[in-house]
Image (cartoon, helix red, strand yellow):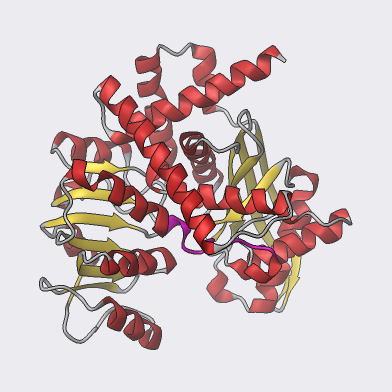
Amino acid sequence: MDDAFSSMVAMIARVGKILSLSNGQKELLLNAQNVLDFSFDVSLSKGLTVLQGCRVQANNACGPFSGGVLFHPLLDISDMRAMAFWNTLSCAVANIPFGGASGGVQIDLALYSQTDVEKVSRAFMQTLGDAVGASTDVLCPGVNTTPKIMSWLLDEFEQQHKRKEPGAVVGKPLEKVGSQLSESALAQGGVFLLQELAPVLLIKKESTVAIQGFGNVGRVVAELLDKLHYKIVALSDGQGAIYNPEGLDVGLVVEHAKKTGSVHDFLGARNMGSQELLALPIGLLVFTGADPQVTSQNVLLINAQVVLELAQCVLSFEADQALSERGIVVLPDILASAGGCIVSYLEWYQNMHRQVWTQERVSRELQTLITQAIRAVSAVKEKHDCDYRTAASVLGIQRVLEAEAVREKK
């Protein structure tokens, strides 16, 4: 998805004009500090297999690199450069002492056994070696990396380095010194964002909602919004979408999806295509799927009042512009997905200080930091009379460059 990298370049150019950035500052933002692009051998059940892996470390002026580990068949270095950049800005917007990184393995996990996935996870960590660690680069959960995979990564790290360092990897199970809310952080952060901005965006609890993607994030968002009495009228997954204008019973859809593996064919709803879901006249459209969904080719389909981007790089730069021109408000990934960065940081903080927090405390800290981020972005938005994505990018870039200036003085 070259759109992700081109969107990054376009946004740096836009912010460069707003903030009058020098060529040197723009080059610093465009170029990652470290790029690890490698292949590694691993002995799997089908024999010796060569896999491609990478880790892009964008910037650590604000703190240790941090970012997701992705296991995906279409993973490539260009995507990771963009995601590492956006992770850097997302952490800066959230005002947490992390920099940004991203990386993973080009692999389709559906083709491998659990034993093979463990071997791949451990081999990937072995290859990363000293490039990662609690004070260097914190590995966070990403696409297809479960708490179990994160625990294997940590175990391999500690074996290789012959020391206990739980903060090197976050997104771990609770029994492996993980954190409360780790698996629901993205969804919960997005809902806190909506609650804070609802009066401004005129989103009411009876507003209709469609959610693209019904994996962990999409399911949790649906459950949380359902509890807040929003009307969920459409849901989709890789097999298609379902729609009921009177509202879906989210609990029953979850049960149906567990039994059948999909939301499709849910009794009491009409099956529809994923593109049809985009065109529904609704109050809120939530994107949670892992792959890009909206480009200049299909952006005119969208007929929502507000778009919430809870997955990275869903909208191409052109699509984002088109929505803004039509008056559709986009709550961008850099802000909307900050909940994931924040709870990763909170887990790291607990590990570094040998603490264990309750779910209530983690939720409280998450809401506080998200609220502060929203208010800071809103202030920048008003100052520069721009959209939320541009405002968040301006704020994030300002904070990164301020941290760089402090580093240069030392």
Place of residue 382 in the rendered image (x, y in percent of width and height, measured from the top left): 26, 25
Could you tell whether 191 is left or right of 84 in the image? left
**Vertical comparison of 388 with 206: above or below:** above
Residue 24 part of the magenta segment: no
Please tell me in which quadrant of the rendered image residue 321 appears: top left
**Outermost residue toward the right?**
162
**Vertical comparison of 228 with 364: above or below:** below
Place of residue 289 in the rendered image (x, y in percent of width and height, measured from the top left): 38, 60
**The C terminus - image quarter:** top right
Query: Looking at the image, which residue is at 62% across and 28% down?
Result: 61
**Vertical comparison of 189 with 33: above or below:** below
Q: How many marks?
A: 0
Closer to us: 181 or 29: 181
Can residue 41 be seen here? The reply is no
Query: Looking at the image, which residue is at 61% across and 57% down?
Result: 105
Closer to us: 343 or 168: 343
Query: Looking at the image, which residue is at 71% across and 58% down?
Result: 124
Closer to us: 30 or 181: 181
Q: Which residues are magenta?
A: 177-186
Magenta span: predominant SS is loop
Query: Looking at the image, which residue is at 78% across and 62% down?
Result: 156
